[in-house]
Image (cartoon, rainbow, N blue to C red):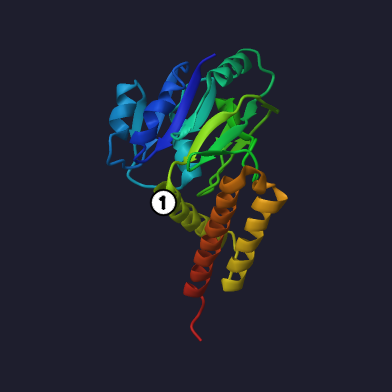
Amino acid sequence: MKLSVIIITKNEADNLQACLDSVKFANEWIIVDSGSTDATVAIAQANGATVIETADWPGFGPQKNRALDAASGDWVLSLDADERIPDALRDEIMAAIANSSHAAYALPRLSSYCGHFIHHSGWYPDYIVRLFRRQNGRFSTDLVHESVNVQQGTTGKLKTAMIHYSYADDETYLRKLQQYSSLGAKQAYAAGKRGGLGTAILHAFTSFLRSYIVRRGFLDGKAGLMVAISSAESTYHKYFKLMLLTEKTRPPK
């Protein structure tokens, strides 16, 4: 069975080498890059990856489908550049594709926040479908928080967590906050949602309580509190931007 790894990138020179090093066991690597100005493309090419450069940005789901369309493997493993596959998970993946009755597998994911691995707050085990038969999976067309739609088959679970270096520092967090909140607001607006300032405040407060209390983020100590605050902040920005979109398109009085 042939395995293809697909990754979408933009300015991931700090992450891509380690990511590719962790998936050397694959048969091919497809990188779809959306205008990197650093060494991302050069790193990908030096590691034998097929690089597809795009001039536009259609959103995470459509961009990942572009990478999927370029893959030729029987199985596809979708990764972000800031994710790593440990050796134990590699062995599980190879065993699964060699002897599988499932069409896809959800992988647990252990994520870090500014140097702290988070085991609560809804961040772990954070199962996400990333391994699937190429003919049985397709990414949703969501601008952000896309998912794999599995067709004609069951989905199993692997045991070993992939490692996700999601927020290396405050600069990374702020950049992702801006990107994800903007895309999330546009996606919500396109789905017919509208909002005001009260909605933004309420959702932010609820997000903090869910992360810190309901999902026991307090058990991660200071890091859990930081995650809860960040969750509230990103949620507020999403709904604040939705409010601005709502006001912008409202007929003048």
Picture coordinates of residue 91, whole percent (x, y): 58, 15
Residue visible at 58% across and 34% down?
110
For the image shown, how many numbered marks are present on the structure?
A: 1
Compared to residue 227, the image places residue 16 above or below, namely: above
Badge 1 is on which residue?
A: 175
Q: Image quadrant of residue 151?
A: top right
Occupied quadrant, residue 152: top right
The residue shown at (62%, 31%) is 108
Point out the residue furthest to the bottom here: 253
Q: Is residue 53 visible?
A: yes
Q: Quadrant of residue 37?
A: top left
Disc 1 crowd rating (10 Å Cα; few below 14, some 14-19, many 20+) is few
Residue 194: tell me if it is visible.
Answer: no
**Residue 52 coordinates in the image, percent (x, y):** 35, 33
Which residue lies at the image location 51% right of the left edge and 62% below the top edge? 237
x, y percentage for residue 100? Answer: 66, 17
User: Is residue 180 or residue 205 the one in the foreground?
Assistant: 205
Seen from the viewer's position, the closer of residues 107 and 73 is 107
Q: Who is closer to the viewer here, 111 or 28? A: 111
| SS assignment at label 1 | helix
The residue nearer to you, when weighing 252 against 81, is 81
What's the residue type where badge 1 is placed? Arg
